[in-house]
Amino acid sequence: MRFGGFAGVVASSLLLYACATAPKPAPPVPPRPPVEPSQGGVATPPPPATAQLRFSDLPGWAQDDHAAALRAFQDGCGVAKPAALADACRRARALGPVDEAAARAYLEAHFRPEAVVPPPGDKGGLLTGYFAPVYEARFSRQGPFTAAVRGRPADLAANPDDPGVIGRQTRDGFEPYPDRAAIEAVPAREPLAWMRPEDLFFLQIQGSGVLVLPDGRRFKALFSANNGRPFVGIATYMRDQGLLRDDNTSADNIRNWLADHRGPEADAVMRRNPRYVFFHVAPDDGKEPNGAAGVALTPGRSIAVDPTRHPFGGLYWIDASAPALAGAFPVYRRLAVALDVGGAIKGEVRADLYTGRGDAAGGEAGRVRHILHLYRLVPVDAVATSPAPVPGRGS
């Protein structure tokens, strides 16, 4: 949905703002599920990939907060399409709030764990992280705020002969939409806001976030569309060029480098990624953003997955260890619900963990790059169903 521009949203909220003496702070990030001790940088071997797994075979199962996991499932499972999963959702919601012991007993009685096995030749599983950033913004171009937040262009469209292909119609036929460099070379006609270039780049990777004005007003920048170009990460390029060490390519370190080299040098690195994301804006309600499934994400309990492999609303056990980046939490072991997608999240054993809003969540998300073993929780007597593809967020 288009909201008519950033300035329009700000104007519509002036009466509410006039009654406030200070901006409403963002809600605190809930505590994360317990993290187990480091495994010395070595990935934990997975249990046997058979249909006869027990919950006790899942590393860390007994240490998880099952009550929190069940609440996350109850909140997000309503989007489930497979019949068995939808039925499991109705039963879970009918149960209502329960304590830790009851939640664990319920999960163990109504589901069975099943290993998600990568196809032959697959490089192996990978867990990464993402978050909802909070960035400064301005109404006009000033100082370091030189990057325009652009709304969806009128000529961006799906190919009528192949709706999965994004581009634009020209006199000569349908063609790919311009890449990042070409888009940025044309002045923005009606920018929604202005940001620092490196902040906009990371906002586009995350797909949504909160913009803060100098007077304290806050607004959500929400994913509207992308230009259809492939997402290309810049970490490998920066490592190969000697700009950052291999174990130092966290999101924070990349963003800091871009800020320190703001201008043509940083622009050239960012333009290695041809994908460009367009936004719309809305008042910040202080809530977590919705994922592609259309329901609010739960920090530490929601994951983005490949929707051609996994259904929305599905419940998964994450076993991720051996982090590749310095300063990362050594192990992530917890239940999570599939509620989002991402341009870079492709494959059977691939997940992106939502860590929350703001700088602390961003610091954590930017260091998540762990070897992943993934397990789906299958409702008892469930029948496998192939999910349908859905559009995704920026990255």
Image: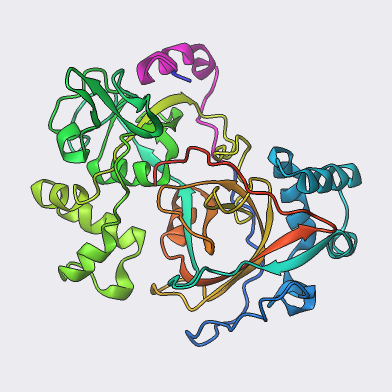
Along the viewing direction, whichever of 213 and 170 lies nearer the viewer: 170
Horizontal and vertical percent position of residue 78: 73, 39
197 vs 320, nearest the viewer: 320
Q: Is 146 placed above or below 281 here?
A: below
x, y (%) of residue 305? 54, 53
Spot occupied by residue 65 in the image (x, y as percentages of width and height): 75, 63
Q: Reply above or below: 363 against 26.
A: below
Please name the residue shown 36% across and 17% down the image.
Answer: 7
Stretch of the chain drawn in magenta: 3-26
Q: Is residue 225 left or right of residue 119?
A: left
- Residue 248 placement, left or right of 55: left
Q: Is residue 19 magenta?
A: yes
Residue 83 falls inside the magenta stretch: no
Against 359, residue 58 (above or below) is below
Q: Residue at x 70, y 40 (%)?
A: 81
The residue sitting at 85% across, 57% down in the picture is 381
Q: How is the image coloured?
A: rainbow
